[in-house]
Amino acid sequence: MHCPYCAEEDLRPVEEPRGAWRCLDCTRVFVVRFVGLSHEGIAGARVAGAGVAGGEGATS
């Protein structure tokens, strides 16, 4: 993993805020958060729930 600010690899976890990392080179503290997957621009990608029984787009 690399610091998103200076690209150094010398990172250490910190207690607060939860899930944060501290870069020992530039001394910044940051949190990386996974938001989700993007299907935009992917040919043939399925939308979540499409074609699943009871989900959007399901047929009875």
Image: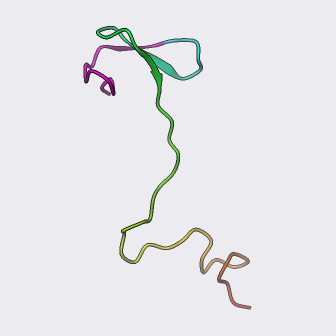
1 w.r.t. 21: above or below:
below
7 w.r.t. 52: above or below:
above
Please tell me whether residue 20 belongs to the stretch shown in magenta.
no
20 w.r.t. 36: above or below:
above
Please provide percent x and percent y for residue 5: 32, 23
Q: Is residue 18 left or right of residue 14?
A: right
Q: Is residue 56 left or right of residue 25?
A: right
* Quadrant assignment, res 39: bottom left
- Figure quadrant of the N terminus: top left
Please provide percent x and percent y for residue 4: 33, 27
Q: Residue at x 30, y 26 (%)?
A: 2
Please provide percent x and percent y for residue 29: 45, 15
* Quadrant assignment, res 11: top left
Q: How many marks?
A: 0
- Figure quadrant of the C terminus: bottom right
Q: Residue at x 50, y 12 (%)?
A: 14
Question: Farthest bottom residue?
Answer: 60
- The colour scheme is rainbow
Q: Is residue 16 left or right of residue 27?
A: right
- The magenta span reads 1-13
Please provide percent x and percent y for residue 7: 25, 24
Q: Main secondary structure of the magenta part?
A: loop
Please tell me whether residue 12 belongs to the stretch shown in magenta.
yes
Q: Residue at x 57, y 12 (%)?
A: 15
